[in-house]
Image (tube, rainbow, N blue to C red):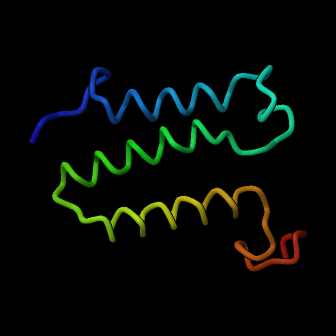
Amino acid sequence: MEILNDQDIVVRLRKRAEIRRSIPTRKSVQAKEPDRIADLLDEAATEIALLRMGGSADQARLERGWQALAACAAKGCIICTGTQGDGR
């Protein structure tokens, strides 16, 4: 198996998504909204990584679902965290 490095496409896609989400002058960052392009970059990285591991489209959909749930819960969504928004 090839060792991942900073030239690997998966690493570069995820790093670019991280950079987009951290630029304070971006409208989506200021509005605390999702960055759709960054989300696509992450999705592409996940697809490539799963394909490299011999994963299927079903595994990719499951991975994206877990990522979306984690992102939603990180924002404090009461449905995803199972709380009432105040930690209960």
Count of residue discs: 0
Percent of width and height locating residue 24:
78, 23
Residue drawn 58% across and 25% down? 19
The image shows residue 42 at horizontal and vertical percentages of 48, 43
> Quarter-wise, where is residue 45 in the image?
top left
Q: Is residue 86 left or right of residue 64?
A: right
59 w.r.t. 29: above or below? below
The quadrant where residue 54 appears: bottom left
Above or below, comparing residue 36 to residue 54 in the picture: above
Which residue is rendered at x = 90% and y = 69% of the image? Answer: 86
Q: Residue furthest left?
A: 1
Question: Left or right: 1 with respect to 71?
Answer: left
Which quadrant does the N terminus fall into? top left
Q: Please state which of residues 25 and 40 is positioned toward the viewer in this rendering.
A: 40
* Above or below for 36 versus 73: above
Q: Is residue 60 left or right of residue 36?
A: left
Q: Position of residue 5 (x, y in %)?
A: 26, 26
Q: Residue 69 lies in what quarter of the image?
A: bottom right
| Residue name at image x 56 percent, y 32 percent | 18
Residue 71, position as x, y percentages in the image: 64, 56
**Quarter of the C terminus within the rendering:** bottom right
Please give the name of the residue rendered at 53% of the width and 59% of the height, measured from the top-left corner. 67
